[in-house]
Image (tube, helix red, strand yellow):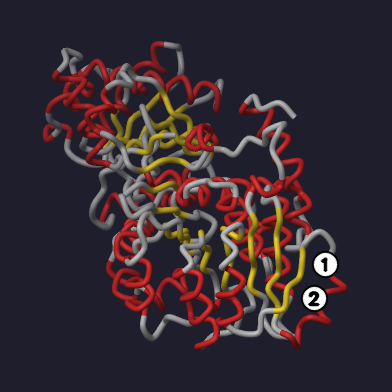
């Protein structure tokens, strides 16, 4: 689950080499892993390795030699000058005795597989010139491409396309994934990604102390709420969702049902008077209470059994919603702020952040999409180099956990931890999907899960629910998939039910 930045991966290499493993031994293992993957992708026929001038190219030379030793027809096309190769890459090239073709994008020919060993994850500048032409030619060839470490042209830290990038059918990376394997658009260029063991020991992570993780159950298994046989509904928390006015009630009901399905013991929809007649016929297990304004909400939250709240879905933008947020913060309620609650602070985000800062150990989750994020964190939205850094900086500024939504949802905590979620299917891009996500988070907060873990668990469950239903999904379907998601998760975590 650990994700390493480019600099952290470099430290892992250096630490391993300092401990006595030669750098060329790591390169040889990496190249062999690539060759093994190539054999699986294309068991027979000619292979072309397109190599660059750095260590990624060295991996390509090793892969070429290994494939040739297996009896495969292999040629290497070097983008650059062989005499300019240095260190381990030069040693790998010196061991290659097969064909070394001049770099000519028009001379790719008809191999059954191209191995892309041009650039590694550390690319920090746009690809231009001959390398760009070579990438374009590889993509246009129609030949399946196996990329070494990361498709050439993708930034390992941000997932950005650096001018042009290889569209790989598969990628072999080493030791741990990089952010660019999971963040968009990089993930779309990787194809199936395999992580190969090249002899770097896991204990090097102790010194590196990674702070980015893939959002998978292993990350939060120890904090997942496990129902107890002697438990009762009040022990599982009481969540509150603020409803909008009569014509804007559906989003809050989606959140409320999701909170209940996610495990909250009780859920109450706090409804303005004009929406009571609309909300009442649509609710069964979710309770309903008339709450006209923030003052009445304060009276409601005086009951400390009501311990978690969602404000935002369909709530309306303006002072009324700001008032509800202020009341929830003053009551030290575990809180999810979504949609209209975020936009209500667009003109004065510092007021929200100051109110959060006034709390001791707050359990607050902000769930913006990119547009809402830009309204609250405009400078960060335009200046931070990656989605992970945007979420991290926003979490540090706001004092809350920030869940920055998208197909590559990133969750970040004020202490610098970040998780990238990669299990979202395309079916989740539908109206109301985010309202359900907010409700799942709230249901977990109500059960006492810490804010970062609640946001990670909810984002993962949300993605799994989308997969569970599949094509044709609408938001109302998502809460109804959670029982199956939970059963599968209980089986994976060894929880009896």
In three-dimensional space, the C-alpha distance between marks 1 and 2, rounded to whole angstroms, equals 6 Å
Instruction: Judge from the rendering whether residue 393 lies leftward or rightward of residue 436; answer left or right.
Output: left
Instruction: Judge from the rendering whether residue 462 lies leftward or rightward of residue 250; answer left or right.
Output: left
Viewport quadrant of the N terminus: top left
x 68%, y 68%: residue: 432
Nearest the viewer among 12 and 345 is 345
Q: How many marks?
A: 2
Up-down: is 253 above or below 481?
Answer: below
Q: Residue 302, located in which quarter of the rendered image?
A: bottom right
Label 2: few (<14), some (14–19) or many (≥20) C-alpha neighbours in 10 Å? many
Is residue 210 in view? Answer: yes
Q: Which residue is mark 2?
A: 279
Q: Which residue is mark 1?
A: 283
What mark, if any, has residue 148 been given in the picture? none
Percent x, y for residue 58? 25, 28
Percent x, y for residue 295? 56, 82
Q: Are marks 1 and 2 in contact (CB under 8 Å)?
A: yes
Q: Residue 43, located in which quarter of the rendered image?
A: top right
Up-down: is 386 above or below 313?
Answer: above
Label 1: few (<14), some (14–19) or many (≥20) C-alpha neighbours in 10 Å? some
């Amino acid at each position: 689950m650990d994700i390493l930045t480019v600099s952290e991966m470099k430290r892992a290499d250096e630490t391993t080499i300092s401990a006595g493993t030669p750098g060329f031994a790591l390169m040889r293992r990496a190249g062999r892993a690539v060759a093994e993957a190539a054999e699986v992708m294309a068991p027979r026929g000619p292979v072309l390795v397109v190599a660059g001038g750095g260590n990624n190219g060295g991996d390509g030379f090793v892969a070429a030699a290994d494939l040739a030793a297996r009896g495969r027809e292999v040629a290497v096309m070097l983008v650059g000058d062989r005499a300019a190769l240095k260190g381990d890459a030069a040693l790998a090239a010196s061991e290659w005795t097969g064909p070394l073709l001049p770099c000519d994008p028009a001379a790719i020919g008809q191999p059954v597989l191209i191995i892309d060993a041009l650039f590694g994850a550390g690319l920090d500048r746009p690809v231009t010139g001959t390398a760009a032409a070579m990438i374009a030619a590889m993509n246009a060839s129609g030949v399946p491409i196996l990329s070494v470490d990361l498709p050439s042209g993708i930034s390992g830290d941000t997932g950005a396309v650096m001018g042009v990038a290889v569209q790989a059918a598969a990628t072999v990376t080493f030791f741990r994934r990089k952010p660019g394997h999971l963040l968009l658009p990089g993930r779309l260029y990787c194809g199936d990604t395999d992580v190969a063991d090249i002899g770097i020991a896991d204990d090097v992570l102790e010194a590196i102390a990674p702070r980015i993780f893939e959002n998978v159950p292993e990350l939060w298994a120890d904090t997942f709420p496990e129902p107890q046989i002697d438990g009762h509904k009040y022990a599982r928390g009481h969540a509150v969702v603020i409803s909008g006015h009569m014509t804007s009630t559906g989003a809050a009901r989606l959140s409320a049902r999701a909170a209940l399905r996610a495990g909250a013991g009780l859920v109450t929809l706090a409804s303005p008077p004009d929406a009571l007649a609309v909300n009442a016929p649509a609710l069964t297990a979710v309770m309903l209470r008339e709450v006209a304004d923030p003052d009445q909400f304060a009276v409601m939250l005086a009951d400390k059994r009501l311990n978690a709240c969602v404000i935002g879905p369909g709530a309306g933008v303006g002072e009324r919603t700001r008032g509800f947020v202020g009341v929830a913060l003053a009551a030290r309620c575990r809180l999810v702020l979504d949609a209209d609650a975020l936009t209500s602070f667009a003109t004065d985000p510092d007021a929200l952040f100051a109110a959060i800062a006034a709390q001791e150990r707050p359990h607050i989750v902000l769930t913006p999409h990119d547009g809402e994020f830009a309204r609250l964190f405009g400078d960060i939205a335009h200046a931070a180099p990656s989605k992970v850094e945007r979420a991290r900086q926003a979490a540090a500024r706001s004092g809350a956990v920030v869940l920055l939504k998208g197909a590559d949802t990133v969750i970040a905590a004020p202490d610098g931890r970040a998780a990238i979620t990669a299990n979202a299917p395309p079916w989740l891009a539908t109206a109301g999907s985010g309202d359900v996500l907010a409700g799942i988070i709230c249901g977990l907060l109500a059960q006492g899960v810490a804010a970062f873990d609640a946001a990670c668990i909810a984002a993962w469950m949300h993605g799994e629910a989308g997969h569970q239903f599949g094509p044709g999904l609408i938001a109302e379907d998502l809460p109804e998939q959670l029982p199956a998601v939970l059963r599968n998760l209980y089986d994976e975590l060894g929880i009896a039910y």
